[in-house]
Image (cartoon, helix red, strand yellow):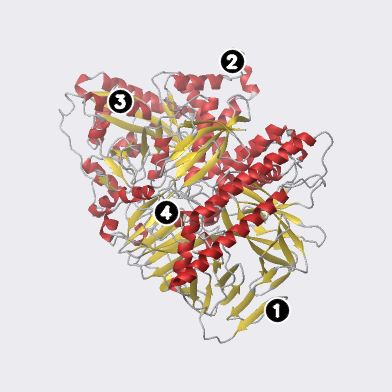
């Protein structure tokens, strides 16, 4: 009996594949013929073009069919196993709906060699592992004397007899691109004067040095000094450069001025996605290359609130050899100071060798200001901040002011300062010392340059003239310091690798004193954190504008389409990159700026979103147009417009209602921003319920028509939601037709309402009002069944693969703030205890939707509209549940709202959060730490696991996350706080918006896991399914509406346009295809930056039925046939931000990436 079933299954599968393939070939072949009349004189060229298109189609079809046949054995095995196992589960009271199958049900094929990486990672020894450091530190915070958070430092007078102390005093000015003032206001009031004074004062003495980081400000100043009226001093005009320009170049060339890091901003390191970190780094480095010819060598991060190894990796890949960090937990600083490990090689957790090592210097004391950088005693160091001399606007909080240096006091003051330098040097392993000299917006006043430099010059002169002091002191830059450090280590003939330890891990969560943990900003202003991710989704190719623009540009060049080539699109794209880069600043995306500054950031993002959507529409229209030469562009609007519109910088996007007619179809072009072929649900809004969705060939597409609700209980009579399953090639555009039709193949959704007071008008929908229903509320698809309580909150789920039920509860909580003097604010999370359950005074209204394409449950609480949705898809998106929360806490006082997911998973106080969407960092919930210390940043995912299962929460926006008890994941969704937390902002967080949070919950079965090894491992990886699910969540299909009808009958659209010839390997992500600026003049070059990332993944999960037709290839891929319709002319390796080319750089045709590697290539396509 079993044998006959297998033959039946096998025969059915073969028959379906053959019939489907023949139909597909005939259908696509039909589509390739021209529909419009042939133009006179173009027949031969048109024939060749048609023939070439037919050949290309046949090649793709053959490749697809070969792949289907090659995997048919796996499909049959899977199907036959399911037949042998028999039917599983019961229908329950939820409508399962139809199951939409892929062309074949595939197991995700991973090369066994690709699975070795995850099993080997973390086996390498590190001298310092941050997880172990947290176990060692008591976090007891005793009074350390003058160094309150440290200890008393002693030294012997003869310690420098054989090797003098070498001190580099590094003047700098930290300029926030927005915080208490907007970016423009700070520039107007402060920053421009810093630059102007710098050029004049450094010129006075070649021994003076200065350091700068934020290129956003430098670029703005550069534009001003290149103004023609500045070039009036004709003796300095050369090649159109003003006097200030030439001075600046000379300062850079002779080493008086160093550009450090060179990103557009000094970014936050907790909440940004790695795409945005790379993008702002490239923007800064490209500007420097074009305007100054400068290549930064050293990283400088003194103000981000905690530090991520992702940033260390990106700097290493960009060609940096050393970096500096500052804001690290005070207990960690003390521990490192005791162990003399403040300088270390920062190595990635997953690195099996040392290729990611970058030398890192950690500043040891409380702050980067002058009182906390010369040595352990701020009372003494403050006396050497000469801006605080008596009579000025600032004094020293410790009560002892500075003294101007004179011959009468230089000896005593020099000895006092040298004592601090010597004590500080005792915390390090060499006799080379770094002493930063600066603070926020310092050196904006002309007088400060004289006060600081002239007084220090007298101190230097005295110290250097006294051999018995055994010190050599000078002004320097960060690279001067690191060069001297490496020279000193080399002189000892030990080598840096033997002098400095290796360290792996991160530096979150930061605390600057007491129990003041900076875990609040992980969530502050979540509306704008979500807006940031949407902006990224429009810029990055995986999300649209960059790749569509670059390839459309190549088509425009090929066909000489001047309307596209002469458009301001590249200028607009550059402005959008810079506005996104500006928002990565550590007081922007963090939500820690003044209200009006936040509005300024939001307005910039909003304006760029609108302008980028114009680029997307024009680029997509050119690519999908059959005859490119007929391209037309309206400067005021796009032919293709996205179906979501945001009316203002502080409002949620809304769907556009498409007006249908029975006579003429509306065209919908859907873009798949993912590098793999994909099927996903597309939902649009139309003005008629009798709607038909057609493929471009006219084949009906099954659709679900759902109600659009004007409010909680009122169904709109003017708008309807249409949902259908779209199957689109990798990075592909596909055309669908939507029209009004009485012979519609669409299906109306059904509704069941609970705890309802009444419904005004059901319209055409079947709505059932449940007054007293005893049965549980359930929804299901072919993978999952979910149970809900009468409040519409999830209680449990069943995975149909093994038919096991799992407790999976969702609930909402409130956290308050402490009643102590210091309370929660924009930066700090200082709760008043454990989270308290969210309590409704009455049962919430619950709406259950059941349909062919999706089913969901929505509950309406006072402060949250909570929706759980299941898609009836066979494949990636059917195996997890989508959760959408619309949060509105504008009427609460000093509260933070949290979603908690509870399960029976025994994670033993261990959980995992991602860092910047790039890597996973294991966490431990530590009872010796306060509750707020156990909250960590989450950019894309968090998970808990035991030997049998992993529960993942995937997120489409950066938020704070924790696991306060076994089996739990908590995510902070919004916070409203009425007071300042005394970190300089001077206000609370009370400009809350109605905010949308989007998540997916994925439960996976683990196989062959050793939990003891699991607990010891400092590294973890998502499964391929989790990677894919996260990518789908963050790379949604982009539907675009053709505005009105085609303007000319001659204009025809292709049925689809894949930008890639085939899917990339499952573990390779196309991060960006970024059009590169021209080196001369304004505009673009003929090159682009192709950035690829090979993801690390864990194979200890069932991959059966994942449903994605891709495999892994050990990181190897050919680029010659990467793009469809575009030839790769050249591909050369580059550093991450395009600053450097390898010495042996040459044109390559094949790429090989190591696991976790991010690499950039210069690419030319035609």
* Mark toward the viewer: 2 or 1: 1
Residue 1142 drawn at (x, y percent): 43, 28
Residue ID for mark 2:
238
Mark 2 or mark 1: which comes first in sequence? 2
- Estimate the spatial distance between the alpha carbons at disc 3 and disc 2, rounded to whole Å: 36 Å
- Estimate the spatial distance between the alpha carbons at disc 1 and disc 3, rounded to whole Å: 78 Å
Q: Residues within 10 Å of mark 1 (few under 14, many from 20)?
A: few
Q: Secondary structure at mark 1?
A: loop
Residue 670 drawn at (x, y percent): 65, 53
Closer-to-camera residue (182/760): 760
* Mark toward the viewer: 1 or 3: 1
Residue 181 visible? The answer is: no
In percent of the image, x 70 and y 40: which residue is there?
Answer: 51
Q: Secondary structure at mark 2?
A: loop
Residue 199 drawn at (x, y percent): 49, 23
Is 515 on the left or on the right of 812, as rendered? Answer: left
Mark 3 or mark 4: which comes first in sequence? 3
- Estimate the spatial distance between the alpha carbons at disc 3 and disc 4, rounded to whole Å: 36 Å
Is 187 on the left or on the right of 696, as rendered? Answer: left
Q: Secondary structure at mark 3?
A: helix
Residue ID for mark 3:
484
Residue ID for mark 1:
760
Mark 3 or mark 2: which comes first in sequence? 2
- Estimate the spatial distance between the alpha carbons at disc 4 and disc 2, rounded to whole Å: 50 Å
Residue 379 drawn at (x, y percent): 30, 40
- Estimate the spatial distance between the alpha carbons at disc 2 and disc 1, rounded to whole Å: 76 Å
Location of residue 409 by image quarter: top left
Is residue 892 shown above or below 314? below
Q: In the rendering, which numbered label is found on residue 937?
A: 4
Q: Tell me the quadrant of the picture where the C terminus can be found.
A: top right
Location of residue 756 by image quarter: bottom right
């Amino acid at each position: 009996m079993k044998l006959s079933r297998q033959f039946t299954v096998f025969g059915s599968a073969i028959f379906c594949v053959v019939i489907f393939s023949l139909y597909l070939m005939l259908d696509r072949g039909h589509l390739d013929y021209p529909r419009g009349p042939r133009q006179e004189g173009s027949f031969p060229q048109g024939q060749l073009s048609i023939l070439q298109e037919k050949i290309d189609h046949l090649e793709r079809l053959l490749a697809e069919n070969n792949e289907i046949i090659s995997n048919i054995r796996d499909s049959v095995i899977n199907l036959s196993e399911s037949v042998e196992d028999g039917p599983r589960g019961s229908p329950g009271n939820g409508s399962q709906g139809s199951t939409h199958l892929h062309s074949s049900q595939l197991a995700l094929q991973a090369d066994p060699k690709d699975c070795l990486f995850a099993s080997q990672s973390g086996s390498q020894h590190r001298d310092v592992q941050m997880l172990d450091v947290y176990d060692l530190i008591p976090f007891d915070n005793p009074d350390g004397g003058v160094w309150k958070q440290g200890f008393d430092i002693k030294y012997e007078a003869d310690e420098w007899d054989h090797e003098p102390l070498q001190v580099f005093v590094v003047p700098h000015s930290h300029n926030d691109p927005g915080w208490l003032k907007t970016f423009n206001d700070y520039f107007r009031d402060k920053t421009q004067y810093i630059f102007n004074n710098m050029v004049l004062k450094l010129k006075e003495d070649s021994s003076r040095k200065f350091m700068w980081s934020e290129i956003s400000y430098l670029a703005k100043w550069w534009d001003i000094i290149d103004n023609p009226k500045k070039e009036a001093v004709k003796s300095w005009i050369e090649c159109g450069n003003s006097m200030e320009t030439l001075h600046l170049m000379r300062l850079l060339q002779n080493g008086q001025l160093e550009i450090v890091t060179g990103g557009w901003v000094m970014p936050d390191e907790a909440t940004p996605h790695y795409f945005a970190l790379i993008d702002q780094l490239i923007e800064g480095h490209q500007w420097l290359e074009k305007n100054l010819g400068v290549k930064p060598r050293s990283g400088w991060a003194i103000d981000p609130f905690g530090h991520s190894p992702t940033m260390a990796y990106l700097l290493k890949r960009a060609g940096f050899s050393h970096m500096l960090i500052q804001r690290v937990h005070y207990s960690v600083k003390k521990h490192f100071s005791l162990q003399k490990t403040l300088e270390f090689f920062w190595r990635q957790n997953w690195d099996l060798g040392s290729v990611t090592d970058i030398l890192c210097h950690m500043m040891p004391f409380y702050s980067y200001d002058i009182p906390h950088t010369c040595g352990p005693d701020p009372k003494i160091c403050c006396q050497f901040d000469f801006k605080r001399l008596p009579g000025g606007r600032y004094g020293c909080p410790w009560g002892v002011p500075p003294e101007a240096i004179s011959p009468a006091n230089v000896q005593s003051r020099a000895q006092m300062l040298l004592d601090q330098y010597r004590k500080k040097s005792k915390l390090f392993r060499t006799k080379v010392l770094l002493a930063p000299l600066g603070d926020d917006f310092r050196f904006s006043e002309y007088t400060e340059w004289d006060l600081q430099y002239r007084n220090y010059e007298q101190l230097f002169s005295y110290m250097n003239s006294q051999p018995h002091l055994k010190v050599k002191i000078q002004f320097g830059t960060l690279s001067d310091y690191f060069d001297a450090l490496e020279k000193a280590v080399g002189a000892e003939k030990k080598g840096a690798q033997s002098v400095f330890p290796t360290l792996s891990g991160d530096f979150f969560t930061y605390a600057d004193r007491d129990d003041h943990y900076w875990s609040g900003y992980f969530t502050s202003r979540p509306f704008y954190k979500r807006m940031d991710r949407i902006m990224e989704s429009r810029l990055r190719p995986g999300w649209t504008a960059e790749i569509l623009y670059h390839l459309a540009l190549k088509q425009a060049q090929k066909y000489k389409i001047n309307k596209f080539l002469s458009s301001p699109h590249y200028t607009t794209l550059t402005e959008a990159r810079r506005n996104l880069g500006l928002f990565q600043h550590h007081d922007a995306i963090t939500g820690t700026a003044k209200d009006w500054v936040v509005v300024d950031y939001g307005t910039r993002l909003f304006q760029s979103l609108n302008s980028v959507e114009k680029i997307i529409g024009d680029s997509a229209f050119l690519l999908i147009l059959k005859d490119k030469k007929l391209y037309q562009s309206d400067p005021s609007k796009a032919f293709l417009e996205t179906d979501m519109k945001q009316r203002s910088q502080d409002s949620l996007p809304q769907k556009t209602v498409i007006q249908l007619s029975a006579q003429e179809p509306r065209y919908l072009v859907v873009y798949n921003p993912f590098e793999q072929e994909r099927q996903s649900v597309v939902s649009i809004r139309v003005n008629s319920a009798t709607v038909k969705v057609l493929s471009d060939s006219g084949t009906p597409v099954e659709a679900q028509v759902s109600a659009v609700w004007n409010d909680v209980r009122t169904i709109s009579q003017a708008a309807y939601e249409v949902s259908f399953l779209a199957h689109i090639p990798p990075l592909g555009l596909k055309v669908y037709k939507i029209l009004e039709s009485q012979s519609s193949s669409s299906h109306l959704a059904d509704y069941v309402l609970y705890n309802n007071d009444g419904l005004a008008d059901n319209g055409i929908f079947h709505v059932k009002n449940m007054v007293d229903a005893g049965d549980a509320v359930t929804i299901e698809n072919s993978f999952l069944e979910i149970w809900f309580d009468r409040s519409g909150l999830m209680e449990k789920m069943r995975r149909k693969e093994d038919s096991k039920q799992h407790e999976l509860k969702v609930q909402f909580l409130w956290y308050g703030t402490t009643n102590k003097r210091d309370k929660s604010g924009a930066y700090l999370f200082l709760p008043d205890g454990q989270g308290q359950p969210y309590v409704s005074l009455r049962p919430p209204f619950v709406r259950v939707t059941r349909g062919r394409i999706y089913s969901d449950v929505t509950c309406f609480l006072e402060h949250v509209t909570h929706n759980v949705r299941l898609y009836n898809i066979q494949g990636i998106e059917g195996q997890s549940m989508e959760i959408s929360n619309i949060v509105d806490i504008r009427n609460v006082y000093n509260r933070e709202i949290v979603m908690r997911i509870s399960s029976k998973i025994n994670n033993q106080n261990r959980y995992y959060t991602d860092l910047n969407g790039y890597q996973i960092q294991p966490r431990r919930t530590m009872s010796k730490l306060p509750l707020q210390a156990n909250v960590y940043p989450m950019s894309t995912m968090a998970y808990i696991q035991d030997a049998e299962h992993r529960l993942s929460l995937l997120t489409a926006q950066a938020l704070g996350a924790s696991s306060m008890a076994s089996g739990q994941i908590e995510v902070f969704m919004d916070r409203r706080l009425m007071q300042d937390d005394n970190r300089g902002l001077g206000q609370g967080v009370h400009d809350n918006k109605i905010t949308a949070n989007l998540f997916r919950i994925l439960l996976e079965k683990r196989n062959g896991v050793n939990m003891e090894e699991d607990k010891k491992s400092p590294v973890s990886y998502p499964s391929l399914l989790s990677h894919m699910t996260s990518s789908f969540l963050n790379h949604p299909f982009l539907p675009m509406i053709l505005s009105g009808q085609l303007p000319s009958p001659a204009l025809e659209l292709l049925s689809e346009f894949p930008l890639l010839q085939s899917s990339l390997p499952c573990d390779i992500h196309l991060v960006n295809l970024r059009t590169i600026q021209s080196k001369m003049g304004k505009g673009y070059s003929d090159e682009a930056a192709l950035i690829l990332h090979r993801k690390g993944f864990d194979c200890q999960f069932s991959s059966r039925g994942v449903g994605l037709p891709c495999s892994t290839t050990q990181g190897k891929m050919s680029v010659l046939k990467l793009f469809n319709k575009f030839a790769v002319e050249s591909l050369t390796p580059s550093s991450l931000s395009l600053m450097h080319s390898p010495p042996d750089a040459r044109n390559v045709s094949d790429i090989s990436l190591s696991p976790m590697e991010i690499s950039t290539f210069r690419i030319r396509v035609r």
